[in-house]
Amino acid sequence: MKTGKIMRYIGYIIILVVVLIGISFAVMNANSVPVNYYTGQQHVPLSLLLALSFGVGVIIGIAVLFFKNTRLRLKNRWLSKRLKKTEKKLNALRATLEESTD
């Protein structure tokens, strides 16, 4: 068997284990809890409330990482352009130095 297939099977097993843990968590925490809004109150299953909170946290984390990654890519592009300009200047100076020593 190739390494790619083995890794795929390991990934499927990990996903299956996570789903089973999530289902058992939802069954164990099926109790309703009150959620107080500014304008009212609603009863929601605890597992749903925790899953929604986790999901919102993941979305916020992805957004923060996206913006940070974008900023770093822009800085990397700026530094690459600056490096190319500096290399051109250095090559021009080396050429001038070689001409003057000849």
Image (cartoon, rainbow, N blue to C red):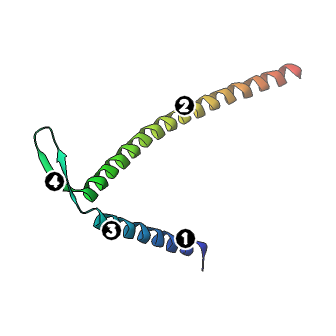
Sequence-wise, which precedes: disc 2 or disc 1? 1
Sequence-wise, which precedes: disc 1 or disc 3? 1
Q: Which residue is mark 3?
A: 23
Badge number at residue 78: 2
Q: Residues within 10 Å of mark 4 (few under 14, many from 20)?
A: few
Q: Residue furthest top?
A: 100
Measured Cα–Cα span from mark 3 to mark 4:
20 Å
Q: Which residue is mark 1?
A: 7
Q: Residues within 10 Å of mark 3 (few under 14, many from 20)?
A: few
Image quarter (top left, top right, bottom left or bottom right) of the C terminus: top right
Q: What kind of element bears circle 4? A: strand
Q: In the picture shown, does residue 62 fall above or below 89? A: below
Quick one: 59 or 44, which is closer to the camera?
A: 44
Left-right relation of 46 to 74: left
Amino acid tagged 1:
Met
Q: Residue at x 43, y 70 (%)?
A: 17
